[in-house]
Amino acid sequence: MAYLVLANGDIYEGKRIGAEGDTIGEIVFTTGVVGYLETLTDPSYAGQIIIQTFPVIGNYGVIPEDFEGTPAARGYVVRELCDTPSNFRSQGTLDAFLKEKGIPGICGVDTRQLTRTIRESGVMNACICDEIPENLDAVRAYRVQGVVPQVTSAEKRVVPAKGDVRFHVALMDYGAKANILRSLVKRGCEVTVFSASTPASEILEGNFDGIMLSNGPGDPEENVFAIEQLRQLIGRLPVFGICLGHQLTALAMGGKTMKLKYGHRGGNQPVREVRTGHTYITSQNHGYAVVADSLKGLGGTETWVNANDGSCEGIDYPEKDCFTVQFHPEACSGPRDTGFLFDRFMHMMEARKGASAHAEG
């Protein structure tokens, strides 16, 4: 037996799964029907306890080829955990995976009621524990802080392109999902992955064709050093930012971000393109958003909006050769509806190279 205790005092009784030990985190829900492996291995969940709204989780087991990174979540909550997965690619059960990765969890709780509570009250903290705490001071005091340094690459590494090398790209790793790398290398990019602590001068000395800004966890405003480096980089080379990279770019340009009531998480989030009016189904995982109006007069134009709540989902900076989106175009939501954004990045780098060659000629 185990308990999930919310900061508002609500108590849910269930069955312990995953690793032993109590845990405290910010509790959030994700609406994905599938993709629990990608969720659990997404570094953007650092500091958080994840609720899966879909009632049965673990039915296709554990498939390492689908991992996006090193798990950073602090806890896991499901309605029903399948302990007899059926998939020819499966290499084990989800419960065994949670134990191996040190992630405490709980099953058998009413995830529908949990999700309604968070939607109505907003994101809050919670704990998974074996005994109900006498007071909730420690739970309420918890903050998701300093998480980007926990999930960024420890050292620089180079990932070769598939086939001929078309471009050399610097990837700023704030907690990058593996599929961002895959999306670049399959388009002929040799990618150099840099830690979030890398100074702009090192990037500018690298003779790169473009800069990719990754996703990542936590409050974007915390990343003061990274924001300052982006101020020095934006406008020097083509830039494409995703998720946290989108938020950091807005802050570097003088804009603002805000915390959403309960965020957007899951592989079924509708986003509308302002220019065409078309709506795309996207994968998302974030609790903060860019305040689009804060970029008026600063060179930023809103290009995508969330179809549910109208929050900002994308910004173009045409004078800086830079564009960013809040959602994940490297994911497979529709199944690959917005993958063309990577092609746009390729065209930007090609145009910059062509202009440089013409100038030299």
Image: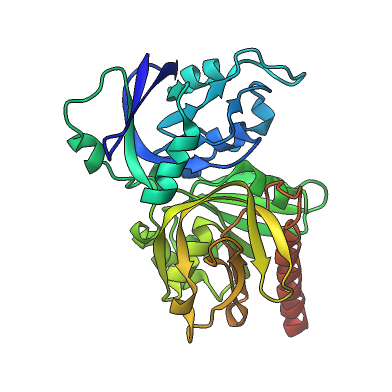
Compared to 255, does 196 lie above or below? above
Residue at the outermost right position: 163
**Residue at 51% across, 70% down:** 233
Q: Position of residue 55 (x, y in %)?
A: 58, 29
Residue 167, image quadrant: bottom right
Compared to 359, does 334 lie above or below? above
Residue 134, image quadrant: top left
Q: How many marks?
A: 0
Tell me if 122 is positioned left or right of 60 in this view: left
**Residue at 53% across, 41% down:** 30
Colour basis: rainbow
**Residue at 68% across, 50% down:** 330
Q: Position of residue 110 (x, y in %)?
A: 46, 29
Q: Position of residue 169 (x, y in %)?
A: 64, 58
Instruction: Give whichever of 171, 313 is nearer the camera.
Output: 313
Q: Position of residue 43 (x, y in %)?
A: 50, 41
Query: Quick check: can you spot residue 341?
Result: no
Q: Which quarter of the figure is the C terminus placed in?
A: bottom right
**Residue at 45% across, 25% down:** 109
Query: Quick check: can you spot residue 115?
Result: yes
Q: Which quarter of the figure is the N terminus placed in?
A: top left
Tell me if 147 is positioned left or right of 350 in this view: left
Tell me if 95 is positioned left or right of 218 in this view: right
